[in-house]
Image: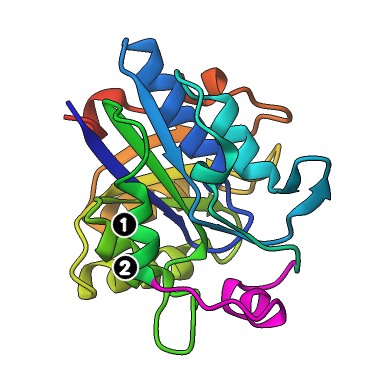
Amino acid sequence: MSRRWFVTGTDTGVGKTRVAAGMLAALAARGFSTAAYKPVATGCLLGGDGLRNEDALILRDALTQPIDYERINPVALAPALAPHLAAEEVSLSMDAAELAAMADQLPVADGLVIEGAGGWRVPLSATETMADLALALRAPVILVVGIRLGCLNHALLTADAIKRDGAAFAGWVANIMEPEPERVADQIASLERRLNAPLLGRVPWLSRPEPSDVAAWLNDTAWWH
């Protein structure tokens, strides 16, 4: 198999990690080996093992094989800021090509799930964005849409940017952000009519979801074939 996907979102905090971990669980349930990559993470906490990011740890724990944290998340930054600003605070420069090359050094797996930081055009540096990293990784893009007020505009703009930048748009996942969202079915239907890409899953509100719980709501035939 040996496939890879880049998971981006309409914004920060829309459920990218939830969906990425669900993808890993779905792959594992089908007997595929998995690897994960969170190239850049901000807001990391310092512990006995160094700087650690909660999202990267969730991905690590969902894998079928042990991979050192530092290989999953090579750039762990403490400031809870956009990546380029967090990097500036610690005098670090980031390069999309170098970060993409690190993914090629991960252990071989049937499926590699890569999670971006923030949204599609979040800056990495003065000249590059997360989009440049996704393109350098040569990975089809899966867009996570947090279903809430404002998501229609955010989703349509992000999808347009993905296509304009020349990335392969594999599809999108509707992640419901609230216990009882208003007219959620209508919002999802509106996006289905306009995004012109496969709807890969509808993840309901789950207060404390395990990756296997999310996997149950993903369309496993639409994104890995």
Relative image position of residue 64 (x, y in whole percent): 45, 18
Q: Quadrant of the N terminus?
A: top left
- Would you say residue 15 sits in the magenta stretch? no
Q: Secondary structure at mark 1?
A: helix
Q: Residues within 10 Å of mark 2 (few under 14, many from 20)?
A: some
In this rendering, the answer to whether 154 lies above or below 225 is below
In this rendering, the answer to whether 192 lies above or below 218 is below
Q: Which residues are the magenta region?
A: 80-95
Residue 88 visible in the current orientation: yes
Relative image position of residue 92 (x, y in whole percent): 59, 76
Q: Residue at x 49, y 43 (%)?
A: 71
Query: Observer-nearest residue: 217 or 97?
Result: 97
Q: What is the quadrant of residue 27 in the picture?
A: top left
Which residue is the extreme one toward the right?
A: 47
Q: Quadrant of the C terminus?
A: top left
Query: Observer-nearest residue: 147 or 18?
Result: 18
Q: Residue at x 75, y 48 (%)?
A: 50
Query: Observer-nearest residue: 58 or 201?
Result: 58
Q: Residue at x 41, y 73 (%)?
A: 95
Give left or right: position of 178 versus 147: right
Give left or right: position of 44 versus 98: right
Q: What is the quadrant of residue 13 in the picture?
A: bottom right
Give left or right: position of 121 versus 178: left
Report if the CB atoms under discs 1 and 2 are less than 8 Å apart. Answer: yes
Q: Residue type at mark 2? A: Ala
Q: Residue type at mark 1? A: Ala
Which disc, if any, is residue 97? 2
Which disc, if any, is residue 101? 1
